[in-house]
Structures are given as C-alpha cells and as structure tokens.
Image (spheres, rainbow, N blue to C red):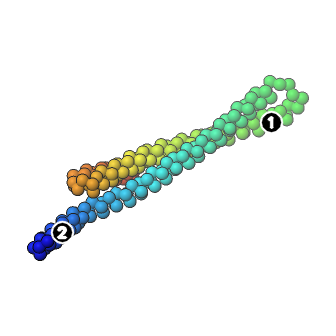
Amino acid sequence: MEPNEAQELQEVAEDIEKADTKRENALRPVAFTMSVMAVLVAITTVLGHRTHTEAVLKRAEASDVWNEYQAKKNRAYDTALITDLLGVVTIADKEAAAKIAKGYSDHQGKWAEDFKEEQEEALGLEENVKLAERQARFFDLGEALLEIGLVISSVTLLTRTKFYWYIGILFSIAGVASALTVLFLR
C-alpha cells in the first residue's frame, strides 16, 4: 500500500466518523423527546390507576350507604307491620300497647328523615363515582396516545427519518391534551 492510499483511507474513515457524529447529534432531540414522552406515560399511568382506585372506593362507599338505607327501610317496614298488628289484636293492657305503638311511630318519623339524608348521600357518592370513571377514561386515552407517540418516535431511530418523530410528537400532544382534560371535568 502506498502512502497516498493509506492517507486517503484515513481521510475516508475520518469523514465517516464525522458523518456518524452528525447523525448522532441530529438524533439527540429525538432521544430527548422520547425520554420526556416516557416520563409523561409514567405520570399519566399512575394518575389513571389512582383515579380508577378512587372510583372503586367511592363505589364501595356508595354501596355501604345504600345497604344501610335498605336495612333501615326493612326495619321501618317491620315496625309498621308490628304497629298495624298492635292496632287489631286484642291486648289486655291497652295503655302499654298504645305506648309501644307511639314509640314505633316516633321511630318511623326519625327514620323518614334518615332515609332522605342517606339517599342524598348515596346519590352524591354515585355522582363522584361517575366523575372518577370519566376522568379515568381520559387518563387511559392519554396514556395510550402517549405510548403510541413514543413507539412511533422510536421508529425515527431506526429509519433516520424525522417524519416519524413529528407524527409521534402529534400523538403525544393529543395524549397530554386528553390527560389535561381531566382538570375541566366536573
């Protein structure tokens, strides 16, 4: 090999190295964007899971209130039956029967107020469940769009075509918008 050939080979190798460095530098914004997208996916996922958990807990709380409401309704019905029975059965001590019937009647009045309060509480909790479920759906959509954006952006690293990076950014923006929509739900 002649000295000129060796020098030419070295120059070609240096040119290739410079081109590789240029390509790597051109892909740094893509890699950084993908890192940001991955963080946003993680945040959206955690928020979505917490919102789903909140919906489940609120549903259980509403169920507990409805169960208490139903138990009191059953007691009120039983008390009404006993009061009716005391009115038609012949009892030796009519004063005692009247006193018992009055006590049952007082309970009925108090329970009527309790029914209304518990029903309103349970309905309020059910509204909270619906809100949490709507929020969770937006977080889920945001998570999916961010993941799609991340995957599409990663194609840029394989193809060296920035078109995929731009499409990935669009999907990610849509994902962030979906997640932020939760702030406006009431």
> As drawn, which residue projects farthest toward the left?
4
Image coordinates of residue 5 in percent, x first then y, are 12, 71
Number of marks in picture: 2
**Label 2: which residue?**
13
Residue at 21%, 63% in the rendered image = 23
Residue at 47%, 43% in the rendered image = 130
Side (left or right) of 104 relative to 154: right
Residue at 44%, 47% in the rendered image = 136
Q: Nearer the viewer, residue 128 or 55?
A: 55
Of labels 1 and 2, earlier in sequence is: 2
Camera-near label (1 vs 2) is: 2
Give the quadrant of the N terminus.
Answer: bottom left
SS under mark 1: helix
Amino acid at the residue labelled 1:
Ile
Q: Could you give the CA–CA distance between mark 1 and mark 2, rounded to whole angstroms?
A: 105 Å
Image coordinates of residue 177 in percent, x first then y, are 33, 51
Image coordinates of residue 63 in percent, x first then y, are 59, 41
Image coordinates of residue 112 in percent, x first then y, are 64, 38
Q: Is residue 111 visible?
A: yes
The quadrant in which residue 107 appears is top right
Q: Nearer the viewer, residue 131 or 3?
A: 3
Amino acid at the residue labelled 2:
Ala
* Residues packed near mark 2 inside 10 Å, few (<14), some (14 to 19) or many (20 plus): few
**Label 1: which residue?**
100
Q: Nearer the viewer, residue 52 or 126?
A: 52
Residue at 41%, 49% in the rendered image = 139
